[in-house]
Image (spheres, coloured by chain):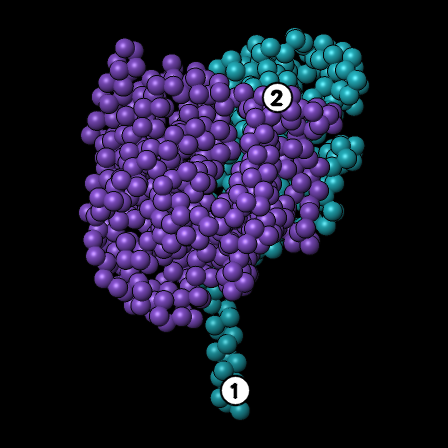
Chain colours: A purple, B cyan
Amino acid sequence: MDIIGNLAHGFAVAFSFQNLLFALIGALIGTAIGVLPGIGPVATISLLLPITFGQPATTAIIMLAGIYYGAQYGGSTTAILLNLPGEISSVVTTLEGYKMARNGRAGAALATSALGSFFAGSVATVVVAASGPLLTSIALSFGPADYFSLMLLGLIISAVLAQGSIIKSIGMVVLGVALGLVGTDVQTGQQRFTFGIPELSDGISFVALAMGMFGIAEIVLNLERPEARSVLKTKVDSLWLTKEEWKRATPSVLRGTVVGSILGILPGGGASLASFGSYMMERKMSKGRHLFGQGAIEGVAGPEAANNAAAQTSFIPLLTLGIPANAVMALMVGALIIQGIQPGPRMVEAQPDLFWGLIASMWIGNVMLLIINLPMIGMWVKLLQVPYKFLYPAILVFCCIGSYSVNNNVFDVYSTVVFAVLGYMFNKLKMEPAPLLIGFVLGPMMEEHLRRAMLLSRGDITVFIERPISASMLAIAAVALLAMMLPNLRKGKEAALSG
Amino acid sequence: MLPRRAWLAGGAVIAALPAITRAETPWPAQPIRLVVPFAPGGTTDLAARLVAQGLGARLGQPVIVENKPGAGSTLGAAQVAQAAPDGLTLVVSNIASHAIAPSLYRDLRYHPLRDFTHVALLIETPSVFVANPQFAPRGLGEVVRLSREQPRGLDVASSGSGSSNHLLIVQFGQVTGARVNHVPYRGAGPAMTDVIADVVPMMSDSLPSASGHLRGGAVRGMAVASAARHPGFPALPTFREQGVDLVSNSWFGISGPAGLPPAVIGRLNREINAVLAEPATQRRFAELGGLVSPLSPAAYAEFIAGEVARWAPIVQASGAKVE
């Protein structure tokens, strides 16, 4: 078969000494910046970009790609151990992963995340190789109306599935959407809710919001309850998964891989949408759904598999269309153009070394990451035994560096502090911050697509029902909403969640 | 009162110290910070990094690129306007921050000419109209005709409201009488996706970001807004050739805060133009789809003044206005 010949060619390229070396360097750097909260792949890749000017194009892209998916591996480490999401994609890992760590299962959570990521990464590599161009055409069939309906569905499901009071979680989603609308209106260029502060004209920084609400608020809560810290000091019994845990995690990894591979291809989607999507799915479908909120392994396995699968399939729009799906991919385009390669639909034929070499290197990189990460799990877990009085100042410093380095702007550090205070208050009021984050991410995208769909249809609202993709999404959303409102079903849901 | 006098004298010596060192060691004694007011990865960022590398080698001090995106590239520009005029803080001045923003933002924190010392122009890149390959009209004349037949106008996408590409659409409507329905996006990438997917038939883009898709045949070029045909795309006719008298280039250069010492201005301009003259730079800028345009500092300042005056009435007509 053609694809096997192509892959063999790709492995021949990727196995050259230079390419292997730079794949390893990329994976190492990626893991390191993933572990350090707040220092993300965008800042790192832009710093390293000039180094790649002198390298061959294939080597340069292999290294930069290694940094990107290496960061996905490393990012889950701080999310699980310290409740600190450095990136959107690891927000949901904090929800169950951190609880597992507090239950003394930090090692199992880390192992699940590494193995799940490896499996998903391997599958996604095959997906990219086998059906990249085909999947691109599916992604292109999503119009603005379809995106709107998909995101509406996401928001409704996140409200339906939230823990505790439904009123509170709907309130948090709405508040998140409102915060997401701060900034410049895409349609008119008008600034909204910026109160004349130019730093707000591009919206509130996601990193500031996530670090403040999850990371710093968590530190304050820990300092408030001395007994909570001692939980972290309890002996970690085993680094490996029990038989029972294997059984529960495996189907979640499989589902996460599928969800991640699909959502990664959608322009504007990528790893973050994938991990949210998988989390929601696990919460509804997995056998352990009644354990969510107390450290369910499914809530780590699914999203971690999904975000790694998506990190790799998000190369598909770049490699087949030349369109970057996120900020990291935009940097990849830049690196290619500097090398004299125009990313576009002809790249697969014009640059076979690059295309197939990159795909092969992704798989090799995943093997390397597994080898780097598994033996280190014991070391990371020891981090929890560091006295908290030494740990938390370091975390605070990294949070400040992280929120500053996204835009090189002190204003973002101040925003982090404001959101830390808010996050602390929400915790005291028993309001979950996760629905707020989902609203914050999806809300503005939803508005943009809604208004674009209306602009293109000249104000005709029937586009949302006429298009089959959009219509089916809306139908599912309506069913979910109805299910939430029917009283006996709702009782059943509460019983399931509390029991 | 001796101790106090000694203190004062000591203070004076300390205050004079930096001046002495400055006189003894020639500029630049420290690394130079070059603020790029855009996110990393775009054409401006790449070109700035290329120039920074060459410039650093020539000046003997590293030139460090710092991305400070936000508010249509005015945040980074405002920061440099307030910096000390010691030649150690520079900004990539561009069509958005220095030509369009003065008319677009009501309370901009800087004046595009008075608050800066303009040093050198780097690159000019023309705008292009590109369309989905299935789009029926072959030339601009047919586009105008089609747009008049449609009751609410023809959909045309751009990278954002108030961008130079958006303003070209506005100008196109003014000059030809075409009826256009502007569809803004958050950046050129998503807009291009929707043109390829035929959600919107046509878009106004800058040549660097469109060139890969043009070469790959994912979109068809309708017209390029440069004065003459672009050497990289000899088959793509200009607006003027098709009877539409429009030339629209986006551009960027290097500027510093107002009051840079003349010696620093002269040296910077000389070294930047030397970097631009290197074959390696020329080749890479051509790959980016731009034309290298060396200018003297005075000519660059004059160029910017002309651009500010030129875009003001078009911004007015576009209806985009940021409070």
Task: Find residue A44 and report its image quarter.
Answer: top left
Q: Position of residue B243 (x, y in %)?
A: 73, 12
> Helix, strand or loop at disc 2?
loop
On residue A126, the disc is: none
Judge whether B28 appears above or below A11 on screen. below
Determine whether, in the image, residue A16 is placed left or right of residue B279.
left
Q: Position of residue A366 (x, y in %)?
A: 27, 35
Name the residue beneath numbered marker 2. Answer: A467
Q: Chain of mark 2?
A: A
Q: Residues within 10 Å of mark 2 (few under 14, many from 20)?
A: some
Extreme-bottom residue of the structure: B1
Determine whether, in the image, residue A207 is placed left or right of residue B237.
left
Extreme-front residue of the structure: A488
Q: Chain of mark 1?
A: B
The residue lying at 40 percent from left, 70 percent from top is A225
Q: Position of residue B274 (x, y in %)?
A: 47, 34
Determine whether, in the image, residue B236 is placed left or right of residue A83.
right
Badge 1 amino acid: Arg
| Front residue (pair B245, B16) | B245
Q: Can the viewer see residue A71? A: no
> Helix, strand or loop at disc 1?
helix
Name the residue beneath numbered marker 1. Answer: B4
Q: Residues within 10 Å of mark 1 (few under 14, many from 20)?
A: few
Screen quadrant of the N terminus of chain A: top left
Determine whether, in the image, residue A38 is placed left or right of residue B229.
left
Quote the CA–CA distance across marks 2 and 1: 84 Å
